[in-house]
Every structure is written in C-alpha cells, then in structure tokens.
Image (cartoon, rainbow, N blue to C red):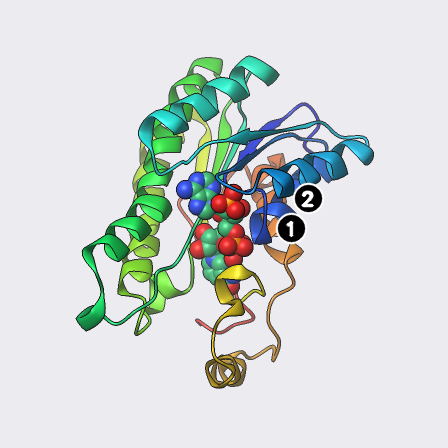
Amino acid sequence: MLADKVAVVTGGSRGIGREIAKELAKHGAKVVVNYNSSATAAEEVVAEIKEAGGDALAVQANVAEFDAAQNLIKTAVDTFGKIDIIVNNAGTTRDTLLLTMKEQQWDDVIDINLKSVFNVCKAAARPMVRKKQGGRIINITSVVGITGQAGQSNYAASKAGIIGFTKSLAKELGQRQITVNAIAPGFFPTALTNDLPDDVKDHYMDLIPLKRWGDLPEVGYLVCFLASEKASYITGQVINVDGGIAM
Ligand code: NAP
C-alpha cells in the first residue's frame, strides 16, 4: 500500500509512535524513526522493521528546536531521496492545575507538542512541494484538545493548537495535493498515561462507550489509511480514535 513511500515519524521510539512506525513499514514505507532521548528504543524499532524485511533509520532530534527539526528532515531527504509522509507524533505532558503551573511547564508542553509540529512541517513542506508528488501530513492531537481537561490546560492548548494548524495547512497545501489531517486518540496505555491514579482511570473507563482503552496499534491503522492513496480526498479533518469517549 505504501511501497516506495518515505515516512518520518516524530517520537517513533516509544508508545503510539513506535506502533505507527512499524505499521507504516509493514505497508512498505521506508521510515525515519525520530527520537529525542530513547536511542536504544529507537534502534530496536529500526531493527524490528529491518528484520521484517523493511527499511528504517533512527534519527535523534529534539523537534521542539527549529534547527534540530531542519536537520531531521535534511537527514531523511539525504538518506531516502524524498519525503512523502510526515507523522507529527512527539508529545509530552506536564500536568497540573493553572494555579500551580510554572511558566516552564507551560513552555515545555507548547514547545514539544505544538511548536514541534510547526518546526517539522516548516522544514518538510518545501521539499515535499518541490517534488510535485503530493504528500501526507498527519498530526497526532488528542481528545483533550477538543474537550479540555482540568489539570491539562497546557496540554489541551497545545493539542487544540494542532487542530487549528492542521486545518490552516490543509488549506495552504491542498492545491499541491498534500493532505493534512489530525488524529485525536482517546486513552492508550503508554508512559504518558501510566501515572494516572486508579480512580481517574476508572472514571475514564466509565465514560468510554467501548469499555476499554485503545490498543497501541489502533492509531497506526488509521495513520496508514490516511497515508494511502485511498485517502486522497480527505484533508483538514480531525478523526478520533477514542472508543467513542469524545462524541
Ligand atoms: P510516550 O509513550 O511518552 O512517547 C512519546 C514519544 O515522543 C517518545 O518516542 C519520545 O521520544 C518522543 N518525544 C518526546 N519529546 C520529544 C522531543 N522533544 N523530540 C522528539 N521526540 C520526542 O507517549 P504516547 O502516549 O505514545 O504519545 C504519543 C502522541 O500521542 C503524543 O503526541 C500524545 O500527546 C498523543 N496522545 C496520547 C494519548 C495516550 O493515551 N497515550 C492520548 C491522546 C494523544 P524519547 O523517549 O526519545 O524522548
């Protein structure tokens, strides 16, 4: 489905991004697995992809930094010759109520979750446009960016910002046949959600119509569909993968 395509997955070393990278590779894409600090985990993803007959490369870059994102995209183009698919997945949390939130907690989350999306798209858009072969940009937001969440004003703002950015870029790049969509996951068992207290987990479980958390590959399945030719007329959309919690 994605043979001859080149994909960059930010935060591909762990959690949801790791599964996205593996799923894209399973469908034939060459994958640049970006990470910030988890070098071993990123190399494991690359090894798994290669063992299965695919092609991948781990690239360190703190995508919150403009220059690092430029280097990430340059490395991808230098290695594989082009970029067809960008998945902006890198993300973090610094949860606390506004009354106790430090400026640094606000800045970290906005920079890692939102500025990173600008940084990577800014670096990748020109090479994608120049290639004149269209493309796919898929941004991982969150249901929290739609509904809001007490204790997550920084995170919710960053994720809501991604939605506005996605729709604007979809309008800018549409004539180039580059689609730009966002995926809003609900609750998935990763390092981001591990530390939630049990009563909070139980509360969310009550609210999820499907009565279970997501399985990690379930975001990757949608990424692969949006990255494929079959999704060529879908742009500017926010699609929830959330068991129905945010409907
Ligand atoms: P995770 O398990 O904590 O993984 C986060 C990934 O992002 C890691 O690969 C990490 O790499 C990378 N990363 C963090 N900061 C980075 C930076 N500055 N530069 C490059 N990479 C960076 O989190 P996750 O749950 O899989 O989350 C993935 C995405 O899904 C995030 O955008 C998150 O907001 C979103 N999401 C998750 C859930 C959920 O329930 N888990 C729900 C809704 C949305 P290193 O280890 O190398 O730093």
Q: Secondary structure at mark 1?
A: helix
Query: Residue at coordinates 55% horizontally, 29% vertically from top-left?
Result: 59
Residue 17 in sight: yes
Q: Residues within 10 Å of mark 2 (few under 14, many from 20)?
A: many
Do tag 1 and tag 2 residues touch (Cβ < 8 Å)?
yes
Q: Nearer the viewer, residue 242 or 42?
A: 42
Q: Which residue is mark 2?
A: 23
**Label disc, if present, on residue 27 of the rendered structure:** none
Distance from disc 1 to disc 2, alpha carbons, whole Å, reads: 7 Å
Task: Give the amino acid type for the residue marked by disc 1 in the picture.
Answer: Tyr
Reading the image, the residue beneath label 1 is 221
What is the number of callouts on the image?
A: 2
Q: Residue at x 30, y 44 (%)?
A: 111
Q: Quadrant of the C terminus?
A: bottom left
Horizontal side of residue 6 vs 161, given as left or right: right
**Residue 212 in the figure: left or right of residue 242:** right
Q: Is residue 200 left or right of residue 169?
A: right
Query: Which element is circle 2 on?
Result: helix
Indicate the amino acid at tag 2. Glu
Q: Residue at x 59, y 16 (%)?
A: 79
